[in-house]
Image: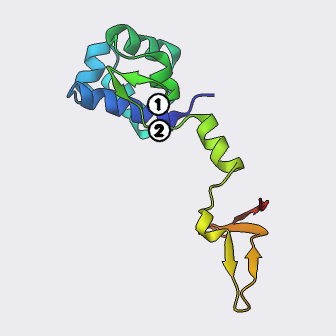
Amino acid sequence: MLNTAIFTKKLQELMAYHELTASKFADSIGIQRSSISHLLSGRNKPSLDFVLKIIDRYPEVTFDWLVKGIGTLDGIETETPTLFDQQEKKLNPTIPQDRVTKKNSQNQQQKIEKVILLYQDGSFKEYDYKNE
């Protein structure tokens, strides 16, 4: 499935790289100007034909960079994380080692058992922590 947020971001990066307005970019790949507007606003999703027109017109653009956010644009490394990076962070949250143990008032070490993340929307996630 296409991640339209990544696609939109990459499309904006490409236009900025070439210093093109949305109208000039549409003209350069031979599509209607309103199509770019609809894509950038999130109203429409890009067709395969649209993606291929971009790749044909701009040889520095790869399919993976434009659609998945992976790779480079003319040697500029992408900052978009991959699905595996995001999944790794979800499965193995990083806890600073200086916070893993804490001494209580009786000089005994306390071990972390569980980490609970509270979100502003009222939801939460729990992670069991295995002390080593």
- Residue lying furthest front: 107
Q: Nearer the viewer, residue 18 or 46?
A: 18
Residue 111 placed where, x, y %?
A: 76, 72
Q: CA distance from mark 1 to mark 2?
A: 10 Å
Residue of label 1: 7
SS under mark 1:
helix
Looking at the image, is 103 positioned above or below residue 26? below
Residue 101 location in percent, x, y? 69, 72
Q: Quadrant of the C terminus?
A: bottom right
Dot 2 surroundings within 10 Å: few (below 14), some, or many (20 or more)?
Answer: few
Mark 2: which amino acid?
Answer: Gly
Count of numbered circles in the view: 2
**Left or right of residue 70: residue 129:** right
User: Which residue is nearer to you in this view: 131 or 57?
Assistant: 131
Residue at the image position 79 percent from the left and 59 percent from the top: 130
The answer to whether 107 appears left or right of 41 in the picture is right
* Name of the residue lying farthest toward the bottom: 105
Residue 86 vs 96, above or below: the answer is above
Mark 1: amino acid: Phe
Residue 43 visible to the viewer: no
The tag on residue 24 is none
17, 56: nearer the viewer: 17
Which of the labelled discs sits on residue 42, or is there none? Answer: 2
State the residue at coordinates (23%, 30%): 21
Badge 1 density bin: few <14, some 14–19, many ≥20, Cα 10 Å? many
In the structure shown, which secondary structural element does the residue marked by tag 2 occupy?
loop
Query: Is mark 1 in CB contact (under 8 Å) with mark 2?
Result: no
Q: Farthest residue toward the left?
A: 19
Observer able to see residue 71: yes
Q: Is residue 12 above or below residue 64?
A: below
- Counting from the top left corner in percent of width and height, residue 66 is at 45, 24
